[in-house]
Amino acid sequence: MVKKFNMTALSINVNKFALIRNARGADMPNLVGISKKCIEYGADGITVHPRPDERHVKFSDLQELKNLTSNYDKIEFNIEGYPSDDFIKRVINVSPDQVTLVPDPPEALTSSFGWNCEENKNFLSDIIKKFRDNDIRVSIFINPSSETLSNLDTIKPDRVELYTYDYAKNYNENKNLAIKPYLEVTNYLKKEFPHILLNAGHDLNLDNLDYILENISEIKEVSIGHALVCDSIDFGLKETIEKYKKITQRKND
């Protein structure tokens, strides 16, 4: 069953908490425990991006996190990753609410670009069908450009996630120019593929989040991890999540 939200959903990426846990080879912080706190403090979802080397989130974490989020009516579980055969098998087995497909290779430090839908249309369409056949919503990571998106009707994702690195990088210098390509691709998607919904993520933070949500009200979900963990050092986890939630709810006040 697809869960519905009346605001921009805040999905917290807990990878950094897992990285801290793994640094000592123990179970502090416990990932399920910290994810539960995130939910109790206001998160609308939990996101993870397990990588083959398991340097942060481990594949053994996935089912436990799925079990946690399943205890709540409106909390979603989102798994990001490159769709290797092993990844596909593991995700289908866990059955999260959403899978977000990224094109970066397994050894990448972080996701750094979106899919070229022209070059990967057959690859993506076959994989997306597998997930949708298993009742898993599919989002794909895209660059803020319409040049490589003309095959979305063939690929058939449920959502696309705007890769917001360039927006965040250029925000302080000129926020109007920084957001311009994102407005253009949003308008393109609304015109050509109105059935495909919009997510956003990468380097969004307390400084730049409000502006992009004010200007692109179509964004259904933001995924935030690194900045939120850094802010928690200053404000504590509860207050930090409350600050982000105040922004994600603002456009619906």
Image: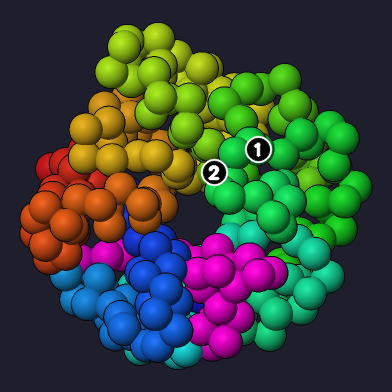
Q: Which residue in the protein does label 1 denote?
A: 114
Residue 76 sits in which quadrant? Answer: bottom left
Question: What label does residue 19 carry, if any?
Answer: none
**Compared with residue 213, is residue 131 higher up or lower down, i.e. above or below?**
below
Q: Is residue 102 left or right of residue 178?
A: right
Q: Nearer the viewer, mark 1 or mark 2?
A: 1
Q: What residue is at 68 percent from the left and 85 percent from the top?
A: 93
Say which of 77 and 23 sits in front. 23
Badge 2 element: strand
Distance CA(mark 1)–CA(mark 2):
9 Å
Residue 6 percent location from the top left of the image: 29, 54
Q: Is residue 58 magenta?
A: yes
Q: What residue is at 65 percent from the left and 70 percent from the top?
A: 53
Residue 129 percent location from the top left of the image: 80, 63
Q: Is residue 224 left or right of residue 211?
A: right
Q: Which residues are magenta?
A: 42-63
- The crowding category of the residue bearing disc 1, from other C-alpha atoms within 10 Å (few below 14, some 14 to 19, many at least 20), is many
Q: Which residue in the protein does label 2 denote?
A: 161
Q: Quadrant of the C terminus?
A: top left
Of the image marks 1 and 2, the number of the one nearer the N terminus: 1
- The crowding category of the residue bearing disc 2, from other C-alpha atoms within 10 Å (few below 14, some 14 to 19, many at least 20), is many
Residue 179 percent location from the top left of the image: 40, 19
- Which amino acid lies under the numbered mark 2 shown in the image of this protein? Glu
Does the image show residue 10? yes
**Compared with residue 122, is residue 142 higher up or lower down, i.e. above or below?**
above
Q: What residue is at 25 percent from the left and 71 percent from the top?
A: 38
Residue 58 sits in which quadrant? Answer: bottom right
Say which of 136 and 167 sits in front. 167
**Compared with residue 252, is residue 178 higher up or lower down, i.e. above or below?**
above
Badge 1 element: loop
